[in-house]
Amino acid sequence: MPDLRRGARRSKRLGDPQPAPEPSGQEENWVLPTQNRGRRRGGGGRGRGNATAVAKGPSAATRARPGGAGRGRGIRLIDLDPEPPCEVLPQAVPVGVAEPALNRAEGAADKNIAMEGGNRDKIMGVEEEASTTPVPDRVQVGNSPVYKTERRLGKGGFGQVYVGRRTSGGTERTGPDAVEVALKFEHRNSKGCNYGPPYEWQVYNTLNGCYGIPGVHYKGRQGDFYILVMDMLGPSLWDVWNSLGQSMSPNMAACIAVEAISILEKLHLKGFVHGDVKPENFLLGQPGSVDEKKLYLIDLGLASRWKDSASAQHVEYDQRPDIFRGTIRYASVHAHLGRTGSRRDDLESLAYTLIFLIKGRLPWQGYQGDNKSFLVCKKKMATSPELMCCFCPTPFKQFLEAVTNMKFDEEPNYAKLISFFESLIEPCTSLRPIRIDGALKVGQKRGRLLINLEEDEQPKKKVRLGSPATQWISVYNARRPMKQRLRRRFFMKCTK
């Protein structure tokens, strides 16, 4: 008598070892998430090399499936927590073999962060040690005064931030003479510090004093930690969104859009793209201060150069589907596909941020599993601007259409993007929930009010065409140098 129930009991999702299929040539070179698109989700299945060398997605952070997740593919869950940034890198290169240069500033160190759905702490052994090492009770770096370490403000993929209170002196709320400051700690054993101070320090050295970027007053190493002494700021847009019942008015979102575009313009003029634009990385000034309505952009750990510092030319286009940098929820489609970061990616992430703040949810929230990035990318490509902005005022759809149709090396028309939102902004300055000083300066400098909005109104190309969406994907061939890669393009049709 055959065992009729054996097939029902043997599920590929329950960790039964499965034979590894042979690679199918070019298929896995199309998009980044295809590396995790197999249906084997348990502890067995196809190996990816030494898991301690490079973490690739949530399975590297935790082998157990979340409790009560069920068996469905692309399971939707209620997801109200901030999403951590992640950086998925290719497999480790043996010692002595040069790693290909990526789109990052000189001396940038890679950072491995667990993707959402896994452990939010750092996953390497030394990084676990770094996350458990207590920070010093008192801090003094360089010529700084002595600060007492108080409560923790937050913990992310690139360090921990604490309140630092000056033990003596100090009369101001911001600046080098401030009574309270923000202390950002990164352990020397974290992967971002393998070659010395964090890469973020280099970015702050270049951007210090840039509009909308908080000031860094002191930095140095004390014991096992690299420490930044920065201005204390107020709540993030994520906190404000939560306090407002997880929804923002179009007026407030328009003010945020205008000021955020201005901040990104100044950042781009310095030759950098942020790489991780999201509500958690926009902060307001301290409550009760003159800057409580001023917007700031923080966390430059994933910033990279779009303009070469030596030649002042735009960096060359590349596509590495095995590399993802950013936050899955807000990342651009180009980031999902492993394309070199440029100015268009920051603006696309800003568009998703604004729509999230108004609607309270994005269409691709709730996906879980090893192929989460692939599912999110496919959903982004399949969602048209009309559907995405169906409950948003027209300017937000115009903004999304404009930024998703930009070319890789195209210079954004920041003044035109700002002008989309003018009709939504409160005329009375004192009633505006967010100050838009930067946008006013841009308008005065360029004569923004005289812009002819009919000019260049029609997009030159379509990146996404709705459902079913289509996308031209460049094929990446890892065996050839970048200049000799195949230039043929393959057409991939993504369906729901």
Image (cartoon, rainbow, N blue to C red):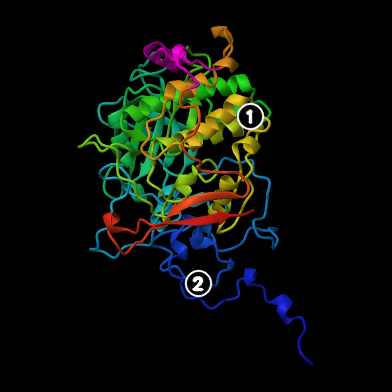
Residue 358, which numbered label?
A: 1
Instruction: Name the quarter where the N terminus is drawn.
Output: bottom right
Which residue lies at the image location 68% right of the left edge and 30% below the top edge? 391
First along the sequence among labels 2 and 1: 2
In this view, the residue in front, 209 or 424, is 424
Q: How far apart are marks 2 and 1 (CA)?
A: 42 Å
Residue 321 visible (yes or no): yes
Question: x%, y% of residue 267?
Answer: 36, 28
Describe residue 404's horizontal placement relative to residue 367 as left or right: left
Query: Residue 46 shows which numbered tag?
Result: 2
Q: Nearer the viewer, residue 132 or 365?
A: 365
Where residue 166 appears, as percent x and y from the top left, is: 38, 23
- Above/below status of 119 relative to 350: below
Q: Do the residues labelled 2 and 1 touch (CB within 8 Å)?
A: no
Q: What residue type is labelled 1?
A: Ile
Instruction: Give the residue type at disc 2.
Output: Arg
Q: Give the SS element for disc 2.
A: loop
Magenta region, main secondary structure:
helix
